[in-house]
Image: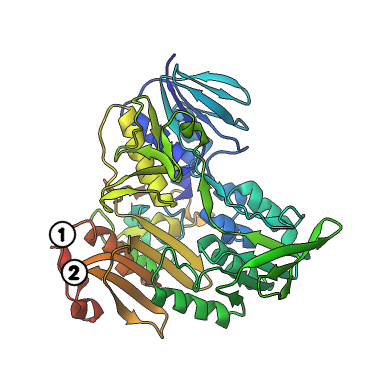
């Protein structure tokens, strides 16, 4: 029984492996993935890859040489079914022994128990295979209904509108991105989507999906309206894949329980990424974050812990999304903010919303304002004190707060 | 950037995958090659203002350098840290 087995082959899995090596782990490393390819960039799947601007060859996060040089053995098309504390994991391709195990199983798309959800043409997007399926279908499509006004739903809606499709977005809450952004930002984004010709229906639910001969035709909203659709995308959030850890009592319903180093209660078992619910230094409490940054940094911490080194995951959370000509960048966590202050010009499409508690900035959402975002990634990690007037004043140099 | 990530060259984090969102693929371009690159646009400039290592006159984000035949032989140095 030796070596590290990583269940999951995406950002977290890759970073666990590379960080373990960088920190001196010398035993074997085996990465199990249920996909057919090396870990790849997921953000382009809803954007550039869908539209054809980003080619498949550029998607891998690291090339084959990286895995060979770092002695990371990737096993494709294998699904873990059960972990045994005796030191092995059962999979669809037999038993893998481990001395240490990392759970980096990510999330799966949340499904809706709707009549018609099983029809051909009703899709979700998590993986490259999902994106391939959507891409294949687009040429024959006229109208698309996207259920869910979160990041993936809006990115897909923007991409499809760009390629000339008639797009409707159905959102249950009273505004888009309500879970992750303040109202000012939601309204700005909604206006931009409307300007680009996307129909946006907030406070709206799906009654059922209609089809004929097994193929989707339309979506009915709860107000009784029919929305014709050749393709329906369900983008209503994600569910953490916690089953392997839950079986061992290492998970809550919201994720695999880890500390700030990616360690579970079992000293040999670690977890990171979208599936992990762990103490976040910046938040000051446990959170589960679905982001590339978190998967990367939590993965690095877990990899170091596996190699016997403590590197705390203390990065300020950050996120990004590209929709139409809006480069959206978010840093920090707005929960608990008392006020929103605008810096820049909303009319010109280049501004940031600063979320403030007391005299401290807790989050910044930016539109086409890269400087505010990157500065925020440094500033939010430090003690600072700023007034609302200073934040709103473009002649006040925010960088002065760093010193 | 892809040249580094695909070939296992350490020191290029490339967290955002080349979408001009993160400033973790910073490089110093050998002076002889600097003029052959496309100019720094506003977004890249804003990101370079905030790179972790020192920004120099030859600082670029490698995601904005598309390798062509003309750039065959280009030399770049990688900073000591990306964030």
Mark positioned earlier in the residue sequence (2 or 1): 2
Q: Is residue B29 above or below residue A376?
A: above
Whether callout 2 and callout 1 share a subunit is answered yes
Q: In the rendered image, which residue does mark 2 sit on?
A: A358
Residue A83, percent from left and from top: 50, 25
Residue at image position (30%, 37%) is A261
Residue A33, image x and y in percent?
Answer: 56, 34
What secondary structure is marked by label 1? loop
Which residue in the structure is indicated by mark 1? A383
A164 relative to B26 in the view: left or right: right
Q: A272 or A83: nearer the eye?
A: A83
Q: Given the image, what chain letter belongs to the residue carrying mark 2?
A: A
Few, some or many C-alpha atoms within 10 Å of disc 1 (few <14, some 14-19, many ≥20)? few
**Chain of the residue that carries numbered disc 1 in the rendered image:** A
Give the side of residue A45 with respect to residue A2, left or right. right
Residue at 57% from the left image edge and 80% from the top image edge: A194
Mark 2 is surrounded, within 10 Å at the Cα level, by few (under 14), some (14 to 19) or many (20 or more) other residues, namely few
- Asked if residue A383 is positioned above or below residue A174 in the image, the reply reads above
Q: CA distance from mark 2 to mark 1?
A: 12 Å
Task: Quadrant for residue A343, please give it.
Answer: bottom left
């Amino acid at each position: 029984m030796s070596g590290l087995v990583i269940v999951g082959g995406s950002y977290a899995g890759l970073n666990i492996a590379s960080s373990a090596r960088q920190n001196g782990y010398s035993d074997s490393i085996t990465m199990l993935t249920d996909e057919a390819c090396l870990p790849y960039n997921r953000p382009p799947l809803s954007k550039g890859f869908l539209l054809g601007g980003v080619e498949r060859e550029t998607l891998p996060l690291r090339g084959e040489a990286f895995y060979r040089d770092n002695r990371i053995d990737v096993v494709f098309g294998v699904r873990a079914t059960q972990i045994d504390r005796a030191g092995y994991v059962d999979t669809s391709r037999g038993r893998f022994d481990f001395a240490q195990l990392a759970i980096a199983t990510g999330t799966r798309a949340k499904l809706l128990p709707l009549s018609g959800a099983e029809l051909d043409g009703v899709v979700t997007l998590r993986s490259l295979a999902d994106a391939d399926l959507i891409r294949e279908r687009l040429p024959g499509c006229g109208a698309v209904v996207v259920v869910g006004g979160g990041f993936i739903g809006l990115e897909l809606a923007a991409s499809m509108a760009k390629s000339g499709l008639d797009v409707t977005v159905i959102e249950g809450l009273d505004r888009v991105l309500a879970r992750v952004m303040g109202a000012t930002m939601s309204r700005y984004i909604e206006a931009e989507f409307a300007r680009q010709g996307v129909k946006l229906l907030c406070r709206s639910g799906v009654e059922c999906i209609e089809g004929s001969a097994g193929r989707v035709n339309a979506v009915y909203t709860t107000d009784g309206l029919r929305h014709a659709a050749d393709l329906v995308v369900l983008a209503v959030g994600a569910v953490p894949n916690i089953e392997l850890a839950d079986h061992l009592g290492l998970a809550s319903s919201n994720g695999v329980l880890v500390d700030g180093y990616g360690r579970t209660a079992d000293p040999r078992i670690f977890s990171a990424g979208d599936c992990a619910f762990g103490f976040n230094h910046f938040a000051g409490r446990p959170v589960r974050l679905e982001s590339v940054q978190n998967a990367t940094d939590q993965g690095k911490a877990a990899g170091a812990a596996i190699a016997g080194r403590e590197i705390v995951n203390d990065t300020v959370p950050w996120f990004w999304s590209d929709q139409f000509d809006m480069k959206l960048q978010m840093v920090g966590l707005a929960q608990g903010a008392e006020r929103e202050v605008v810096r820049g010009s909303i009319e010109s499409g280049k501004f940031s919303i600063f979320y403030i508690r007391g005299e401290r900035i807790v989050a910044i959402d930016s539109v086409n304002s890269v400087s505010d975002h990157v500065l925020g990634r440094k500033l939010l990690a430090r003690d600072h004190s700023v007034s609302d007037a200073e934040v709103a004043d473009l002649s006040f140099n925010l960088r002065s707060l760093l010193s | 950037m892809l040249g580094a990530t695909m070939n296992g060259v350490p020191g290029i984090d490339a967290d955002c995958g080349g979408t001009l969102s993160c400033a973790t693929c910073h490089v110093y371009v050998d002076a002889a090659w600097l003029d052959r690159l496309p100019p720094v646009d506003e977004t890249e400039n804003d990101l370079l203002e905030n790179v972790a290592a020192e920004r120099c006159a030859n600082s670029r984000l490698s995601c904005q350098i598309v390798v062509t035949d003309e750039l065959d032989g280009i030399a770049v140095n990688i900073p000591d840290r990306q964030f």
